[in-house]
Image (tube, rainbow, N blue to C red):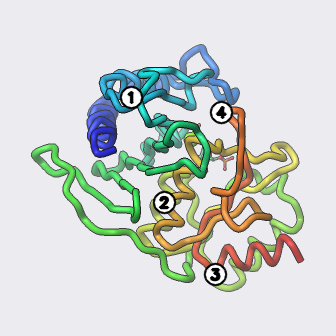
Amino acid sequence: MQEVFSYIQKAVLEISQALKFPDTSYSQNHNFSGDTQLQFDVLSDELITKVLSECKDIKALISEEKEEILTLNEDAKFIVAYDPLDGSSLMDVNFAIGSIFAIYEEKPSAKNLKAALYSMYGARLELVICEDVPRLYRLNAKNDFVFIKELVMDKKGKINATGASQKFWEEKHAKFIKSLFDEGYRLRYSGAMVSDINQILLKGGGLFSYPATQDAPQGKLRAFFEVFPLAYIIEKAGGKTTDGKNSSLLELEFSAIHSTTPCFFGSEYEIEKLLRAYNE
Ligand code: AHM
Ligand code: MG
């Protein structure tokens, strides 16, 4: 596993260096989810594929930017699923974006998740690596990732990061979100899930939601390389997750690699309140 981590570190360092002088234009292509790909979406996918292909412990790669699973080493143990550049539509405004990685053993399934990582390309490069507990690392001037601290969620937060177009929210969702604002929660939403979840983790708590909507009844965010890895990290930090019905996003099973799901990540207080509001 440490071997896989070190190749991921190498890949995110290359992406962060390439982000200093990027091509921010769109390509002619769409990915499997129908998003128009930026040149940099394609480049970051290629960079990760190139670096991880050198790792003998990786059986296969699943990417937001690839339609099919890419087999690397038939007899190896780990499948790495990744979103090469989450929040890439914010590249033009120079907001913080990141890469998300899930490491599955043998088969891509939440119950086989052994570790999750994400990088933050902000004013500085940071990386969260989570097996048993999420650990934050920061790149130093010698290009080494230095351990900063373990990330732990409080029982209740102050931030409300509310995704999707409000026009298409269900009434129960709109009512629930308003009830948090009425309690004093503050709106924090950048449009990059990885940044918004990172803020919730670093500030100790709060809610990130991407609900089912009239235009996307199965939600927008993708299970294998966005939802599962970030749910794994939030839960290992002591937070909770749900799809609005179950007691953890990690209970969900999907067969299609680009499946999406409504998803909620937060501290215990917000997720329990959401489950009551959704199911009363
Ligand atoms: P991406 O992987 O193509 O960047 O898309 C996923 C992003 C998430 O990072 C973010 O939370 C969401 O899409 C924003 O969508 P919306 O503008 O509908 O709230
Ligand atoms: Mg994404």
Q: Nearer the viewer, residue 68 or 25?
A: 68
Contact flag, marks 4 and 1 (Cβ < 8 Å): no
Vertical order, 138 against 253 (above or below)? below
The quadrant of the image that shows the C terminus is bottom right
Alpha carbon distance from label 2 to label 3? 17 Å
Query: Three-letter amino acid code at disc 2?
Result: Ile
Mark 4, residue position: 257
Q: Can residue 162 be spotted in the picture?
A: no
Mark 3, residue position: 269
Of the image marks 4 and 1, the number of the one nearer the N terminus? 1
Q: Is mark 2 within 8 Å of ligand 2?
A: no
Of the image marks 3 and 4, the number of the one nearer the N terminus? 4
Q: Can residue 266 be spotted in the picture?
A: yes
Residue under the image location 48 percent in, 60 percent down: 233
Q: Which mark is residue 48?
A: 1
Give the crowd class for mark 1: few <14, some 14-19, many >=20 residues within 10 Å: many
Mark 4: which secondary structure? loop
Q: Nearer the viewer, residue 133 or 258?
A: 133
Give the crowd class for mark 3: few <14, some 14-19, many >=20 residues within 10 Å: some
Alpha carbon distance from label 2 to label 4? 20 Å
